[in-house]
Image: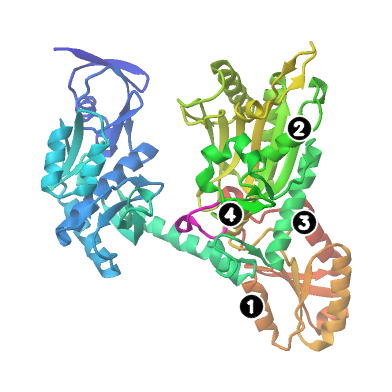
Amino acid sequence: MDKVVLTINGSRDEFPQGTTPQQILEKKNSDLKFSALGALLNGRGIDLFRPIEESGELKFLTWEDPQGKEMFWHSTAHLMAQAVQELFPGTKIAIGPPIEEGFYYDFERERSFTPEELAAIEQRMAEIAAGNHFYSRREISTKEAFELFKKRRENYKLEILEGIADPTVSLYSQDKFTDLCRGPHIPSTGKIKAIKLLASSGAYWRGSEKNRMLWRIYGVSYPEPKMLEAYLARVEEAKRRDHRKLGKELDLFSIKDEIGAGLVLWHPKGALVRYLVEEFWRQRHLAYGYDILFTPHIARLHLWQTSGHTEFYRENMYSPVEVEKDLYQLKPMNCPFHIEIYKTRLRSYRDLPLRWAELGTVYRYERSGVLHGLLRVRGFTQDDAHIFCRPDQVEAEVLKVLDLTFEFFSAFGFEEYEVMLSTRPADATGSLEDWERATGALRRALEKKGLLYSVDEGAGVFYGPKIDLKIKDVMGRAWQCTTVQFDFNLPTRFDLYFVAPDGTYQRPVMIHRALLGSMERFFGVLVEQYGGVFPLWLAPVQAALLPITDEQLPYIENLAGRLKSKSIRVWVDSGKEKIGYKIRGAESQKIPYMAVVGKKEVAAGTVALRRHGRGDLGVKTIEELEKLLLEEIETKKTGLAPKGREVGY
């Protein structure tokens, strides 16, 4: 019998061809036989029950692996499709993939699913899972599959099959249910111990408004009930921190139909926080040798034709407007403007690098269905910069970008992050030599910084490789933030060059770079990171001064003037309410400090100090109060404990 040679955890072993990963676990008597959900063979996901026909590296996947979770949630999606068709005969199924946390499946029926129906589906799923039905896989010809789903009148499966060029496809079954699927799947439904269906909403088939509206059910599942309990607790905490909810409660921003979807109105408090973030941004960029630019919001359409945006980005751009028989376009990006500034004069190798940064407002047409508070909008201000440099300067420039990035992460309290290096795709522009040189520079910079990173092979944009950094907030959620992106396309399109030491004209290297992404999105993330309790240096009001009676108002007003002279932002509550009400009001507005003043405090020249969420801090002299506030502002303390736990908030 033919053999396959497999490397498992660094050790090589021989097995008969056709052995399954599950049989290998049984033979080795490994504890993984109880916890494994699937396997990777040469980096490709396979079922534990799938025969191995080739040699290579075998890795077993558990719940702790991202691919293991994907298999688990994909398998649960099949379970949900079975339950829906059993409970609601005639419902047609479309697609049901895993997502970042959980899964969904799209169904065709006349109306959406009610909460009562979702509860019934969830109950039926639990019953099927308890039956411990094995998942199985079989391959049939694409033609046979077409006939099978034609008999079932599953028109969405037929449309999928029409787009498959392979002569064979795979089907997966559990219990009485069979679906068209590439897989892989977990061994059996019995591993699914906890299920929760979260919501139902409309979704157009294949994301196009021209197609029929389907009804999507979102859900999540876990191998242990306690994991579901923890997830639901996180969901409730996320609701409490939702920036849309807090934005309204704290009077930070609004988005109104009268203005337009995805267009943000910044209220005084929110605008102040944004101003403070932007000022910090400008100060640090100037310190790192950047020049600040300002560019128009609109330009002749010809500029976007030269850049290629009208060719590659048209669907995300607003329609042009006619001005004096010429067409003008709201800008979706800032890069062509920076390039035109570069072209205003001849550049020498001695001029490089040029680091140009702009908080440039751009406008992109996003479908209304994907708009989401500040996180997905149509008008936003990009934290944008472009670096024009010589090839020998690239690595040093990337290192500087990473240094500045981590300064920002630290200042805003983000201690955890994910790093991804994306490499050359099949449709890449630029020479292979340029790609290898650029990718090597990115890789060396990451390694010099000692950063752990993943490589997403072939996932770079067509015009250059890139580094992406995702920050993790206190909830453990990842947010796309920093991007360092090479561009071999625009320097060629705009014919950029510099004069080299030998007098020849050479192309500069162009690097697109964003640190925070956009002011709107980053502000939304900040609100949720802090639950609306901004660190003192960012808080719109840093201290509330609360007199117990009107008799203390003169003392309070003098104190307010003294603190304001030190640039400390204070608010005096001169209302007639009792002090308990005033304290609750300041707490509800998440003001970091509250200084309560009564007769005793006036006589002693002190305040009774309180901290939001922590209560009484004791009596402080005015000098002690000043010192405490100024030190916390100067050091930019975040109020977050290590690993993101809030201190007393």
Q: Amino acid at mark 1?
A: Arg
Of mark 2 and mark 3, the one earlier in the sequence is 2
Query: Which residue is tagged 4?
Result: 525
Q: Position of residue 562 (x, y in %)?
A: 89, 69
Query: Which residue is tagged 3?
Result: 633
Of mark 4 and mark 3, the one earlier in the sequence is 4
- Tell which tag, 1 or 4, sits nearer the viewer: 4
Q: Is residue 175 visible?
A: no
Check the image and report above or below for 419 versus 517: above
Of mark 1 and mark 4, the one earlier in the sequence is 4
Left or right, 159 with respect to 151, comes to right
Query: Which residue is tagged 1?
Result: 584
Q: Position of residue 389 (x, y in %)?
A: 72, 25
Few, some or many residues within 10 Å of mark 1 (<14, 14–19, 20+): few
Task: Report the front residue among 586 and 628.
Answer: 586
Q: CA distance from mark 3 to mark 1?
A: 24 Å
Of mark 2 and mark 4, the one earlier in the sequence is 2
Farthest residue, direction top: 502
Left or right, 39 with respect to 322, comes to left
Q: Position of residue 238 (x, y in %)?
A: 49, 60
Q: Which residues are magenta?
A: 365-375
Query: Which residue is tagged 2?
Result: 342
Q: Amino acid at mark 3?
A: Ile
